[in-house]
Image (cartoon, rainbow, N blue to C red):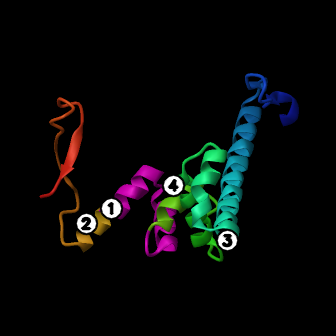
Amino acid sequence: MSQEIALSTAVETWPTFSGETWEAHVTTWVALQESMEGHLWQMGAIAASLYEHFGSAAVKEFAAEVNTSWRRVQEYAHTYNEWTGRERSRIKSFGHHTIAARTDDPERWIQVAEDEHLSTRELERYIQREARIEAGGEPEPHLETCPTCKGVGVIEVEG
């Protein structure tokens, strides 16, 4: 069964999937995942172009018109611009590239994410841990029970 037949993505209807084999599930999933990643990079290109053609003053209006936050538009543009001309990872997500783009050495951090098989949250923690160490602090934050949420959560406190 081909992917076109197995997958319905019509916006007007609820998406369906009629694949029956393991391979159909895997190949369709991978194809969609790759497509989504490609679309995020394309949206980054659009966001970067927006800044180039209309300036930063237009970002909030654009974000409202496309129903997203202006910070997301800003971050997509930053990620796209930061990775333009650099070697992107073929196995790590746009989200990984976004996190790495926030650092002084994005290529190093994307390589760490690949080598250590890090999720986006783990990559953020690695980067934060190194920043704490470089600042002369403890590798791990000091956490305490959050007083306002009645012990349900924890907060990071200055040591």
Q: Position of residue 61 (x, y in %)?
A: 61, 52
User: Which amino acid type corresponds to the residue marked 4 in the rendered image?
Assistant: Arg
User: Which amino acid type corresponds to the residue marked 2 in the rendered image?
Assistant: Arg
Q: Distance between the residues labelled 4 and 2?
A: 25 Å
* Residue 52 badge: 3
Q: How far apart are marks 1 and 2 (CA)?
A: 6 Å
Q: Position of residue 137 (x, y in %)?
A: 18, 67
2 and 3 marks in contact (CB < 8 Å): no
4 and 1 marks in contact (CB < 8 Å): no
Magenta residue check for 59: no
Q: Which of marks 2 and 3 is nearer the N terminus?
A: 3
* Residue 132 badge: 2
Q: Mark 4 vs mark 2: give the one in front.
A: 4
Q: Is residue 85 visible?
A: yes
Frontmost residue, 149 versus 55: 55
Few, some or many residues within 10 Å of mark 4 (<14, 14–19, 20+): few
User: Which amino acid type corresponds to the residue marked 3 in the rendered image?
Assistant: Glu
Q: Position of residue 78 (x, y in %)?
A: 56, 66
For label 1, the residue is 128
Quarter location, residue 125 = bottom left
Quarter location, residue 16 = top right
Quarter of the image where the N terminus is located: top right
Quarter location, residue 56 = bottom right
Q: Mark 2 vs mark 3: give the one in front.
A: 3
Magenta residues? 103-128
Q: Earlier in the sequence, mark 3 or mark 1?
A: 3
1 and 2 marks in contact (CB < 8 Å): yes
Q: Distance between the residues labelled 3 and 1?
A: 31 Å
Mark 1: which secondary structure? helix
Q: Distance between the residues labelled 2 and 3?
A: 35 Å
Q: Which residue is drawn at 12% across and 58% down?
A: 159
